[in-house]
């Protein structure tokens, strides 16, 4: 069932239940009130008749009229305690039974009785029995008190007028309820059409995007829940557009960066093939050419690894584990020291636990240390100076989750500082050195995935300084 149909059905059912409860309550209230009024009227008339001594004055009810008792609109009868029944000759007797006999004998719990019973040709009637005294004498003289016998004055009034009124009331309530349900369904349908129209536009926009991959945000007006959904949808489109843009730039930049080593490798292989046709190269030239090919292949392998790392583009680390950051830094130092000769390392580490990916953090710290070592050595030198002194110095500090790496190089130009963490960005000084321009981008990627941050500046009296901050494990969510 569609949302439109569910809203319409819900409105109809809600109003239908409300109308049903109100109608039932109204019907029951009116019915009870009419019965109560009838009972009060009958009790007053019957009790008044018995108090006025009508039964003693009209001692022969078998020939008397009900009009004489002032009860012409009801059935009247006398139920004697010995079981005899007498009544007017011009009307039928009311229904009498064990309940009325108990009233006549004075054994009824309340002294009187009120009940609804079936009456032939009247559907049903309200019957009331009250205690009375009956004079059995047949002469015209008045009965004395000691000559009366206990009895019950029983009267019955047809409920047909009340039943007809209740029947008409039921028809009216059913008609009103039916009209209410129909009106509620129509109103629900109109509300659904009006309320779901923005949702329909949003659905159409989503279907259009799925067909055309056009990530243009949809127009948004208003401030209701649908508007919030549309704003969230536009935010999702913007995030998706940014992701696609990053992917396009990554593919484009990767193609550009991969073209250089591949072209170099192809050129060297062509030289080898041509040299072999002409008799070959000298051994030292051939070895130099192969070394160049090997270096280009190593650079290509590193570039592919960096691209693979950045292509994941996940918002946060999924399989985090508790790791000791100082141990990660020590492992990275061991790797970098083996390949960075001529560097003096000033290291000071303090324990600091974090939740994260040890491999990714190790890669980021290694990139920071490699970068510092690379720029601490002059471009045209290698190893140690002639006097054995180191060519550069790198300071590494890990204090309270803040890793600071400071090199002794020339620093970073002010124009390059805002771009050092961008993918494939290389300053004019960096283009003469090996690298792909992805190392610091991976550091930033790792910091963001772990809820941290990385920033660069020029240290006073030294070279470039990179600061990596990560939150403590106690404040991180697994």
Image (cartoon, rainbow, N blue to C red):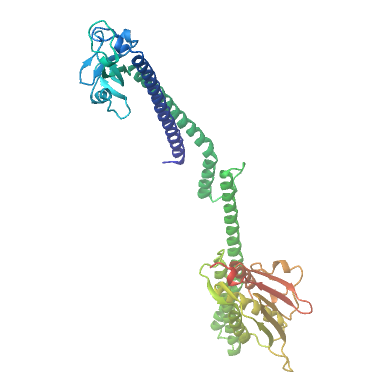
Residue 22 screen position, x and y as percent: 44, 30
Residue 327 screen position, x and y as percent: 58, 81
Q: Vertically, is 384 above or below 246? A: below
- Residue at screen point 30% across, 18% down: 132
Q: Vertically, is 97 above or below 465? A: above
Residue 298 screen position, x and y as percent: 57, 79
300, 419: nearer the viewer: 419
Q: Vertically, is 345 above or below 258? A: below
The residue at the far bottom in this view is 387
474, 366: nearer the viewer: 474
Q: Is residue 369 left or right of residue 169?
A: right
Q: Quadrant of residue 349?
A: bottom right
- Residue at screen point 58% across, 89% down: 283
- Residue at screen point 48% across, 34% down: 188
Q: Is residue 311 left or right of residue 391?
A: left
Q: Vertically, is 352 above or below 8? A: below
State how many labels appear. 0
135, 316: nearer the viewer: 135
229, 415: nearer the viewer: 229
The residue at the far top in this view is 140
Residue 323 is at least partly visible in this image:
yes
Q: Is residue 236 left or right of residue 344?
A: left
């Amino acid at each position: 069932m569609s949302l439109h149909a569910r809203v319409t059905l819900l409105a109809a059912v809600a109003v239908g239940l409300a109308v049903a409860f109100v109608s039932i309550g109204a019907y029951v209230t009116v019915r009870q009130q009419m019965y109560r009024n009838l009972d009060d009227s009958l009790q007053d008339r019957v009790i008044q008749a018995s108090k006025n001594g009508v039964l003693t004055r009209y001692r022969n009810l078998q020939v008397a009229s009900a009009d004489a008792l002032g009860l012409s609109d009801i059935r009247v009868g006398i139920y004697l305690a010995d079981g005899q029944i007498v009544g007017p000759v011009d009307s039928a007797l009311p229904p009498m039974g064990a309940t009325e006999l108990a009233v006549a004998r004075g054994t009824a719990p309340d002294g009187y009785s009120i009940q609804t019973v079936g009456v032939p040709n009247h559907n049903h009637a309200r019957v009331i029995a009250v205690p009375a005294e009956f004079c059995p004498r047949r002469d015209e003289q008045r009965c004395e008190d000691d000559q009366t016998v206990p009895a019950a004055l029983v009267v019955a009034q047809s409920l047909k007028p009340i039943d007809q009124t209740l029947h008409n009331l039921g028809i009216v309530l059913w008609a009103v309820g039916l009209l209410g349900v129909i009106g509620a369904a129509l109103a629900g349908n109109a509300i659904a059409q009006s309320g779901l129209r923005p949702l329909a536009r949003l659905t159409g926009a989503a279907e259009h995007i799925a067909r055309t991959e056009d990530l243009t945000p949809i127009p948004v007006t208003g401030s209701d829940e649908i508007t919030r959904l549309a704003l969230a949808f536009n935010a999702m489109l913007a995030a998706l557009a940014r992701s696609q843009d990053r992917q396009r730039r990554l593919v484009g930049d990767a193609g550009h960066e991969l073209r250089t080593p591949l072209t170099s490798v192809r050129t060297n292989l062509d030289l080898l093939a041509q040299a072999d046709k002409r008799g070959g190269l000298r051994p030292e030239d051939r070895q130099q050419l192969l070394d160049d090919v090997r270096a280009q292949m190593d650079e290509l392998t590193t570039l592919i690894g960096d691209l693979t790392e950045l292509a994941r583009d996940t918002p946060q680390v999924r399989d985090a584990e508790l790791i000791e950051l100082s141990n990660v830094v020590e492992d990275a130092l061991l790797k970098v020291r083996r390949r960075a000769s001529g560097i003096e390392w000033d290291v000071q580490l303090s324990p600091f636990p974090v939740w994260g990916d040890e491999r990714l953090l190790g890669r980021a710290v290694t990139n920071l240390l490699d970068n510092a070592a690379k720029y601490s050595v002059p471009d045209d030198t290698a190893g140690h100076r002639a006097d054995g002194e180191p060519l550069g110095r790198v300071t590494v500090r890990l204090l309270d989750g803040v890793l600071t790496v400071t090199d002794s190089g020339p620093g970073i130009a002010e124009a390059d500082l805002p771009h050092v963490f961008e993918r494939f960005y290389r300053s004019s000084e960096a283009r003469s050195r090996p690298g792909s321009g992805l190392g610091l981008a991976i550091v930033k990627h790792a910091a963001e995935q772990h809820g941290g941050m990385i920033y660069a500046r020029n240290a006073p009296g030294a070279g470039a300084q990179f600061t990596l901050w990560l939150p403590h494990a106690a404040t991180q969510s697994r």
